[in-house]
Image: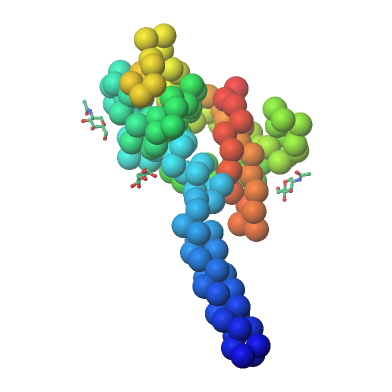
Amino acid sequence: MALKKSHMVLVLLGFFLVGLAQLSAGAESAAEKFQRQHMDTEHLTANNSNYCNLMMKARNMTTDRCKPINTFIHEPKEIVDAVCQEENITCKNGQTNCHQSSSPLILTQCTESGASQFPNCLYDTTYLNNPIIVACEGDVYVPVHFDAYV
Ligand SMILES: *[C@@H]1O[C@H](CO)[C@@H](O)[C@H](O)[C@H]1NC(C)=O
Ligand SMILES: *[C@@H]1O[C@H](CO)[C@@H](O)[C@H](O)[C@H]1NC(C)=O
Ligand SMILES: *[C@@H]1O[C@H](CO)[C@@H](O)[C@H](O)[C@H]1NC(C)=O
């Protein structure tokens, strides 16, 4: 009887571990989050003044609240990933895994406008062409955080 009980515990533990593994497989990695929030390779630039209203929603940055500021990068992924190969500089938070692009990139800055009120998030769309600073992490060393444009 005692043996059966311990078997039952093992089976339950097994279910629990499988569940945990599925949860973590479903979770978005920091690199994936960067892609969702900051990369737009489909548009060469913001296509109109409504761009940020559409894109902030499409990229799930207005789901729980209106994310106040967000920058989209309109450059190929290889160009943005390569910024991680530039020399290390200090990030705004003091970490030293930031890197600045050697040339300006085509960007769109989305800034929440005065009339915006969750869940009706409204944004101003600003066209920019500036070098960027990103934080990078991982075995495959790729961008995980947009620190600034300069
Ligand atoms: C701009 O791009 C969005 C998203 O792809 C699209 O829904 C919209 O129709 C485009 N607007 C124009 C004027 O091309
Ligand atoms: C946004 O969230 C919805 C619902 O959770 C999901 O289906 C969709 O894939 C997400 N979009 C992006 C760009 O992550
Ligand atoms: C500096 O950048 C390299 C990659 O170029 C990275 O592996 C390393 O973690 C960074 N160093 C620090 C102290 O952040």
Frontmost residue, 63 versus 48: 63
Frontmost residue, 88 versus 12: 12
Furthest residue toward top: 114
Q: Does residue 106 appear in this view?
A: no
What x and y, as percent, mark residue 72?
Answer: 44, 31
Kindly identify the residue that appears in the image at 70 percent across and 27 percent down: 92
- Where 12 sits versus 77, above or below? below
What x and y, as percent, mark residue 134?
Answer: 61, 36
Kindly identify the residue that appears in the image at 57 percent across and 30 percent down: 132
Q: Tell me how the rendering is colored.
A: rainbow
From the viewer's perspective, tell me whether residue 6 is left or right of residue 51.
right
Frontmost residue, 57 versus 85: 57
From the viewer's perspective, tell me whether residue 38 is left or right of residue 6.
left
Q: Does residue 86 appear in this view?
A: yes
Q: Quadrant where the C terminus lies?
A: top right
Kindly identify the residue that appears in the image at 59 percent across and 26 percent down: 148
What x and y, as percent, mark residue 38?
Answer: 47, 36
What x and y, as percent, mark residue 106?
Answer: 44, 29
Kindly identify the residue that appears in the image at 55 percent across and 75 percent down: 12
